[in-house]
Image (spheres, grey):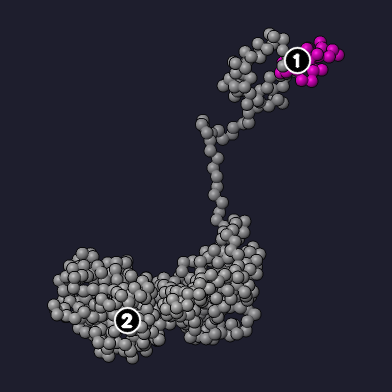
Amino acid sequence: MSGAVNPSVLDGEVPFSACDFGLDKRLSKACAKMQFVHATLVQKHCIPLALQGKDLLVRARTGSGKTAAFCLPVLQKLLAAHTPTTKKSIKALILVPTKELVDQTKAHLWELMYYCRDIVSVLGLSGQTVNAQQALLRDLPDILITTPSRLVIHLEAGNVDLKHSVHTVVMDEADMILSFGYGDDVKKIFNALPKICQHFFMSATLSPELDALKKALLHNPAVVKLEEGSTDGKLTQYYLPVAKTDKDLLLYALIKLGIVHGKIIFFVNSTPAAYRLKLFFEQFLIPAAPANSNRDQGFGVARGVDFRGVSFVVNVEFPKSVKSYTHRIGRTARGGANGTAISLVATNDAAETKSLARVQSKQAPIVLESNDVLSQPAPLAFDMKDIDCFRYRVEDVRRAVTGIAVREAQLNDVKKEMLNSDKLRAHFEDHPRELNLLQHDKQVGKARIQPHLATIPSYLVPTALQAPAPTKKRKHHGGTYKKNHKRRTDNDPLHTFTHDEGKAKKSKGLPDPDEDRIHDGNGGIGVSTSGRQKWKAARKKGHFNPKTIAKRERKARLGAKH
């Protein structure tokens, strides 16, 4: 299978080949080639129902084998209806939320089509331009895989007709499609489809929006909910009371100290606040992209971001309603994965404090083993004094992110959106001067990024979070180690000094001629007993070198003093 399948969703008792799905031999051979050893639970329950012609609403998480669960019935239906006189047309439509999923689904389908590629054709609308896709759509593929926004563009341009040929519609990751704001696009698409066709809705969660869509479109559907027990995701909710002016400091510490990690979504209550947060993160070389509902549906950043696998959701500004809070935290702990939601609540903002109380009153509390009741979200213990060392950095960056810089960042994104817009392409072809102005319009007020801010010096890391210093063991080179060894004394002048009393008495009062000499070579001066001199003597280095000695003696014979 393409992609990893969780072992917990496999039906280990029944081999895939033994499942009586009634598939075409070409599909069975392709499954064997792809090493489908055991059918997953979603495949075992959904494929027979789909082949009976029923509408399906399936709750199955990522990694459950759901892609094959809807691809095999689609291919079986096409092969069963194929005749030499079959007219070319789009017969199956697969909707996915992102361009990346378009490519993944197409690749999986292409493997399943290994023995029938001469009969069935597939097209994925992902990275090509609209004009290139228009040419590809003229070939009328049997299966079309696309995002809702891209399909709406072609429907409005008259590049594709679905009204009289489509008999199967699949919406994979349906909850994500609806949560991305594709609701209006989905309505336009289903208005362009035949009134009678088979629907497969695959989703990690069964949201209220999806339930409403089920009632409007599905005809007596079979609802399949896979009970995966302990493998279901766990959502942990916390809130952090913090001064409004310290929220940036706390966000910096949470990211840089690794308290929050992986894929993170930060929620704010306005578009300018989102851009300000983006610029703030960019100063520390933290990659971030704003996504808001005001952008055009075809713009990649807002509508093509893959929100799967979100580890943390952070409410930088607390939501104003319980519904909004529920919607935000629902972006994590999806499809069996665990997730954490952290909300920053301004202690000096009465509105945020009241909103928190409303949310806690609507959430079911957790009863601990000690029988203590913990409200949700629960308070998270965090001492702001531990991160005061980062304050000067954060304050400097905050001053750099000015209102002008925020406005310019918004305008820059609007310009990019206009330049990439397929709808404006024809306009710019007729008005090249306007295109030239947009391309060369200089951005002013841009905050200067300082690369050194990307790293935290070790002296700034709080003591509680520092790794223990590694202990160094002294190396002993050669010989055995003596526990009570003593320091060498043979090179210590206090231990090696000797005094000849008789000679001292004899020469008492008579000046030694060498004592008056200030610098008269090395003659007459005591021999050093230092370890260095002993090393030189042993290895005949320096003035112990035979050549040096011979040279010195030759000079002495010639009468030279130095």
The overriding secondary structure of the stretch rendered in magenta is loop
> Disc 2 marks which amino acid?
Asn
- State the residue in front, 76 or 66: 76
Write the residue at 81% across / 10% down.
Answer: 506
Q: Which mark is residue 111?
A: none
Question: Between residues 530 and 454, which one lies in front from this camera angle?
Answer: 454
Mark 2 lies on a secondary structure that is loop
- Vertical placement of 450 versus 317: above or below? above
Which of the two marks, 1 or 2, is nearer to us in this view?
Answer: 2
Closest to the observer, 38 or 168: 168
Badge 1 crowding class, 10 Å Cα cut-off, few under 14, some 14 to 19, many 20 or more, is few
Q: Secondary structure at mark 1?
A: loop
Residue under pointer 1: 500
Is 69 placed left or right of 552 in the picture?
A: left
Q: For the residue carrying disc 2, how many other residues have a C-alpha within 10 Å: few (<14), some (14-19), or many (20+)?
A: some
Where in the figure is residue 181, as x and y percent of width and height? 43, 82
- From the image, which quarter does the C terminus lie in? top right
Q: Which residues are magenta?
A: 502-524
Q: Quadrant of residue 536?
A: top right
Please, is residue 325 above or below residue 436 in the view? below
Q: Residue at x 17, y 76 (%)?
A: 79
Badge 1 or badge 2: first in the primary sequence: 2
Tell me the number on the disc at residue 159.
Answer: 2
The quadrant of the rendering that contains the N terminus is bottom left
Q: How far apart are the alpha carbons under marks 1 and 2?
A: 117 Å
| Residue 295 at x, y percent in the picture | 48, 80
